[in-house]
Image: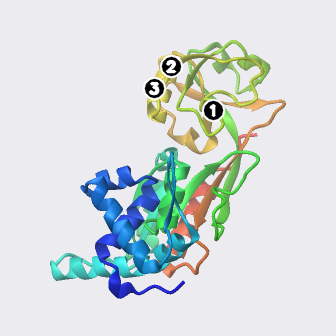
Amino acid sequence: MLMDFTDVSLVGLRVVREIAERGTFSAAATALGYTQSAVSRQVAAVERAAGMELFERRHDGAVPTPACRLVLRRAAVVLDEIDAADRELRGLPVSTGTVRLGAFPSAGAVLLPTALSDLRRTHPGITVHTRDGGTPALVRALRAGTLDLAVLASAPPFRPPDNDSPALVVRVLAERNLCVAVSTAHPLASDEVVTVTDLRGQRWITGRPDGDGTPLGVWPGLAERPEIHHVARDWQARLGLVAADCGITTVPALLVPALPPGVRALRVVGEPEERRRLVIAHLPHTLSDATTRVTEALRAAAARLGGDRD
């Protein structure tokens, strides 16, 4: 694709990046403080310069085309350098070795603090900026060039995070069994393990449904319609309800060290076994030294936090 960057404004490139990350023109307009018509005009200008469409307009959002992903890969370098120049001109510190890291929310409870604490001791010159989000949002940010790395949770059958091209590089940090969190006052808390049969008839505390509509927090292999008593998007809120003995919920092994007082994690034995992977994803390009060091710190932290509880 031939593109004359002299005809493209930095504003236009930022708008394109924001749409690619947020998934809709309206969300990008809100984030940038623009009107939706202004956003559309900026996209149209970049598309004219590119000579092709950058987004596939759908009823549920805007999907970046292969041309858009190419533009974003090249534009990321330009925008990052401009941002660095702006900070330097304003007398602000220009970080060297900066890594932008995204992670699913519960990773911020144990994994990120452990890895970043280690990194400060071993490589104090590396600056890491973090943000949390669900898998779709983090993957869009990777493709938009606003994240360098993303820590994601993956469930069987362990498909790629998306089907776009080029395929993201995905490496497994850890693979562990899913657990069930119960109050220390709950009858099940007298044992360290439970069976799937023990989970029948329990009151469940769930989060938002995942991609196939299954409520997060209910044991996936439960052979009955779950009795859901509470729904809370935040995992800390769910665990607070568990501590108050308002019900039970599933919890990844990664979170076990961060369980609040009054909550126990139980292993579930028998079929079906529920495995969960912790993975790190990035675009298929050579990682900077700083990004490689962050990856290594995350891998070491995941290993030190322990293996399966079975």
- Which residue: 40% across, 66% down? 16
User: What amino acid is at disc 3?
Assistant: Gly
Which structural element holds mark 1? loop
Residue closer to the observer: 299 or 88: 88
Between label 1 and label 2, give the one nearer the viewer: 1
In the rendered structure, find residue 213 and report the number of the disc placed on it.
1
Q: Is residue 114 visible?
A: no
For the residues marked 1 and 2, what is the alpha-carbon distance in whole angstroms? Answer: 16 Å
Q: Residue furthest right?
A: 271
User: What amino acid is at disc 1?
Assistant: Gly
Quarter the C terminus occupies: top right
| Residue at numbered disc 2 | 230
Q: Residues within 10 Å of mark 2 (few under 14, many from 20)?
A: some
Instruction: State whether residue 80 is above or below residue 36.
Output: below
Between label 1 and label 3, give the one nearer the viewer: 1
The quarter of the picture where residue 80 lies is bottom left
Which structural element holds mark 3? helix
Q: Residues within 10 Å of mark 1 (few under 14, many from 20)?
A: few
Q: Position of residue 94 (x, y in %)?
A: 27, 79
- Which residue: 15% across, 78% down? 90
| Residue at numbered disc 3 | 240
Count of numbered badges drawn on the protein: 3
- Which residue: 62% across, 40% down? 211
User: What amino acid is at disc 2?
Assistant: His
Between label 3 and label 2, give the one nearer the viewer: 2
